[in-house]
Amino acid sequence: FDALEKTCKLRREDRELLEYASLLHDAGYWIGAEKHHKHAAYLIREGPLEGFTREEVSVLAALARYHRGKTPKPGHEEFDALARPVQRRVVALASLLRISDGLDRSHAGLVKHMEVEPGRKSLTLNLVTEGNLDLEIHQAERRADLFETVFGRKVRFEIVREGPG
């Protein structure tokens, strides 16, 4: 987020919402693995999340809903209920969460650090790891489509090997 805030015209206050969404997006696994993204959205939307406005809760629920599976689009009831500027925020933030979720596909914390190189037509993510990122890269590439559509930049992944110590 920090490396893309100005380049992608993101709002500073969205950083915190993206952080909370990244913590909550898999909460639906408590109900079931299949459709956990929809379960997470329900839990966020209907749960007692104190300290958030109703709009912020709606954004968090939408981010959880769209972190995998279908991308946000008209015709989805919850998405349609959001004001147009909020829909744009959700799409932009969901595009980041989808890539991040893909980069943690194994839930093993294999990406130790990431350097972001934004370019005019591409975005390169230099991923520092000690392990094998084949699964993570595969998933992140599959989920980068929304970012590429929203921001008009191709996402590239470069692996930087880091030895122990």
Image (cartoon, grey):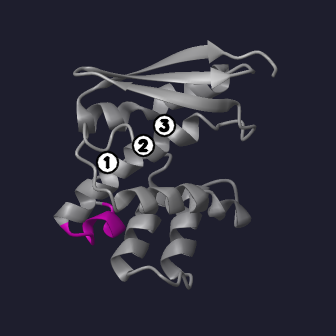
Apparent side of residue 27 relative to residue 73 in the rendered image (left or right):
right
Classify mark 3: residues with Cα within 10 Å, few (<14), some (14-19) or many (20+). many
Residue 96 marker: 2
Q: Amino acid at mark 3?
A: Ile
Disc 1 secondary structure class: helix
Q: Are marks 1 and 2 in contact (CB under 8 Å)?
A: yes
Quarter holding the C terminus? Answer: top right
x, y percentage for residue 128? Answer: 62, 23
Name the residue beneath numbered marker 1.
92
Q: Earlier in the sequence, mark 3 or mark 1?
A: 1
As drawn, 37 above or below 134:
below
In this view, which residue lies farthest toward the left? 84
Residue 74 in sight in this render: no
Q: Amino acid at mark 1?
A: Ala
Name the residue beneath numbered marker 3.
99
In this view, which residue lies farthest toward the right? 164
Residue in view at x 44 percent, y 79 percent = 52
Disc 3 secondary structure class: helix
Apparent side of residue 31 relative to residue 121 in the rendered image (left or right):
right
Classify mark 1: residues with Cα within 10 Å, few (<14), some (14-19) or many (20+). many
Q: Amino acid at mark 2?
A: Leu
Q: Which residues are magenta?
A: 76-83
x, y percentage for residue 40? Answer: 57, 65
Q: Are marks 3 and 1 in contact (CB under 8 Å)?
A: no
